Image: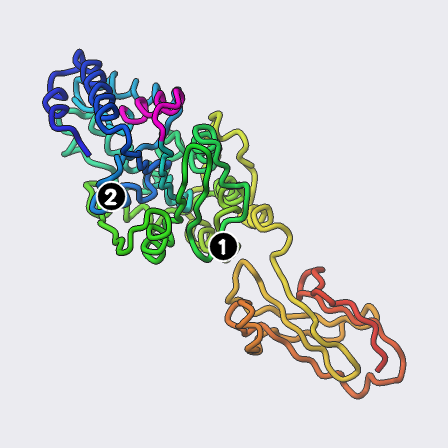
Amino acid sequence: MKTPPIDALRRLGNKKYYLLKWYFHFNYHIRDLLNGNKPYLLVYQMGKVGSSTIAKSLLKYRKDYRICQIHTLRKRVLKDEESFFVDNFDFLKTIDEYILIGQYLSKRIKNKSGKTKYKIVTLIRDPIARNISAFFNNLERRIMLQHPVNGNDVGISHNVEELMERFWNDFNQHDVPLIWFNTELKRAFGIDVYSREFPKSKGFDTYHGETADVLLIRLENLRDCAGEAFRQFLGIPDFTLTDVNVGHDKEYSEAYERFLSSVTVPPWYLEMMYNSQYVRHFYTRDEIQGFVDRWGVSASGSKALPMPAPPDTEQMKRAKRTLTFKEALIVIFGDDTYNGCVDQCDSEIVLGWARNCRFPNERLSVELVMDGELLDTVKADLYREDLLEAGIGDGKHAFYYVIPPALKDGRSHAIKARIAGTDRLLINGVRTVRF
């Protein structure tokens, strides 16, 4: 999607930057005049969510669209991004084309130029995974600026603690995934992706507005749903993906993989990301649990890298600085760490199930209390096919207790069933039974 003459202009140095910008916008304006009826297909997303793969793949199929890849249409953000390249143009001798395209399209959309609706493809991703990927992408560029002569030799540190410190203090995009849809897509096209429930099991959805139609895909589902999604949205019957910009193929791949395999993020960051509207809207409880398991400490606290406090920056003001890991889980998931139910309680048996939602492979114990006194403790580790079919873990969460004959005195007794070691009662866990 590059314009060949731009490569020559890039070598002319910082003073020629605005000539580059003018040429680029003029070129796009001429294309609009010559191809007025050819609609735009925008791969418009927050960055590091698989957009390059989508844009490259679409070029194989839709020659009847002008395909553009952009991250922002906001004037202030574009100005900030442009300032970075202008200030460093002597060394970089380039500018990311998504900035120039974003500037041009921002004016075009504001002026309501063109008669056809925009087609937009956007993507979402686990925000912590996205932020780490964006951090490494930006870090490589910063090192080259700091060491213009020997940047390739300096490279990126493989020290995880050092990288983690830079992640908190140098990276300024932590909240981008959380606010992007409201500050970008909704502001530019009036489309609110939070206005209705997202089909999480399908992994994609379409939205229609006055000036744009949008296809939104979760990166985690992209391989499985891309064919169906693009068939429905663009009428492409045989869509396949072309991989580009893969992290493990880049210069920083070794440091990136080391970081991913050993990093542990602090509780305040887990809460900030996974208690957000963005994550709650697009991901299921079990998927969020999977993210927490990936980045957070384990139940035993076995991952023990230093836990930094939130940097004292504007975007980190809402971070809950003193949270423990357990407290973060309660905030993210509410007070429903445990769930379970008493399915039957009579003069013969007490039957039910209990599960730890955060650690689904743990087998809980259930305390049975009669008339205020502990009657017995039973293990909830029996298999029930109906639990498995209902999506309750692996189905091995049931318990079964036979009422001892010695208790059958013909009187009514108050029975309670609770998670052992807690005061958490099971659903239907308070019964009055005559033995």
Q: Quadrant of residue 373?
A: bottom right
Nearer to us in this view, 252 or 285: 285
- Say whether residue 254 is visible: no
Quadrant showing the N terminus: top left
Q: Percent x, y for residue 74? A: 40, 24
Q: Which residues are magenta?
A: 100-115
Which secondary structure, mark 2?
Answer: loop
Q: Residue at x 67, y 65 (%)?
A: 419
Drawn side of residue 368 relative to residue 146, left or right: right
Q: Quadrant of residue 368?
A: bottom right
- Say whether residue 197 is visible: yes
- Amino acid type at circle 2 is Arg
Residue occupied by mark 2: 62
Q: Residue at x 51, y 54 (%)?
A: 284
Q: Percent x, y for residue 397? A: 58, 72
Nearer to us in this view, 214 or 49: 214
Residue reaching furthest top?
15
Q: Which mark is residue 289?
A: 1
Dot in front, 2 or 1: 2
Quadrant showing the C terminus: bottom right
Task: Give the Cα separation between the discs numbered 2 and 1.
Answer: 38 Å
Which secondary structure, mark 1?
Answer: helix
307 over 4 or under it: above or below: below
Q: Dominant secondary structure of the magenta stretch? A: helix
Task: Indicate yes or no whether the magenta region holds residue 104.
Answer: yes
Nearer to us in this view, 33 or 98: 33
